[in-house]
Image (cartoon, grey):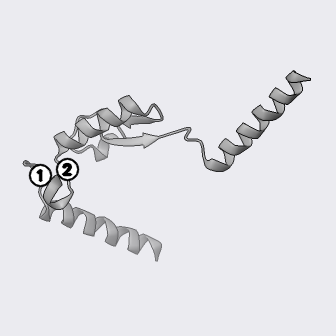
Amino acid sequence: MSSYITAGANKLRKAREWATPTLKESAFLVRGVLTPEEFVKAGDELVYKCPTWSWESGDRKKIKNYLPADKQYLVTRNVPCPTRASTMENSVALNDEDTAQ
């Protein structure tokens, strides 16, 4: 059953990509969508300002020709979650107390 759902979703995705061509002119202010060039520029800025983000090339079979081969999608790694961050803060505070004594 799940393979039928996956196959159907893939067909819908392909139909959507066929029916909605890649933007050539910016529509960000009107519709909130980016051209491929705007996406790459925004991604480069994100990667520059936030070191947890990086570009990935992905599967060669799924590369979109309107994006650079090495900039197919963005991924973030090693992002501290609030729970882990507070745990680390507590452990640092405990270490500081130990060294002060």
Where residue 51 appears, x then y in whole percent?
Answer: 45, 31
Q: Quadrant of residue 31?
A: bottom left
- Residue under numbered circle 2: 34
Q: Residues within 10 Å of mark 2 (few under 14, many from 20)?
A: some
Q: Tag on residue 23?
A: 1
Q: CA distance from mark 1 to mark 2?
A: 7 Å
Q: Position of residue 95 (x, y in %)?
A: 82, 29
Q: Position of residue 76 (x, y in %)?
A: 46, 41
Provide the secondary structure element on which disc 1 rests. Answer: loop
Amino acid on which the number 1 mark rests in the picture: Leu
- The residue under the point 19% across, 50% down is 34
- Residue 52 visible in the picture: yes
Q: Secondary structure at mark 2?
A: loop
Residue in view at x 86 percent, y 22 percent = 99
Left or right: 86, with 15 as reference point:
right
The type of residue carrying mark 2 is Leu
Residue under the image location 85 percent in, 29 percent down: 97
Q: Is residue 29 above or below residue 37?
A: below
Give the number of the mark in front: 1 or 2.
2
Where residue 74 appears, as percent x and y from the top left, is 37, 41
Residue furthest front as drawn: 100
Observer-nearest of 81 and 10: 81
The outermost residue toward the left is 25
- Callout 1 crowding tier (Cα within 10 Å): few <14, some 14–19, many ≥20: few
Count of marks overlaid on the render: 2
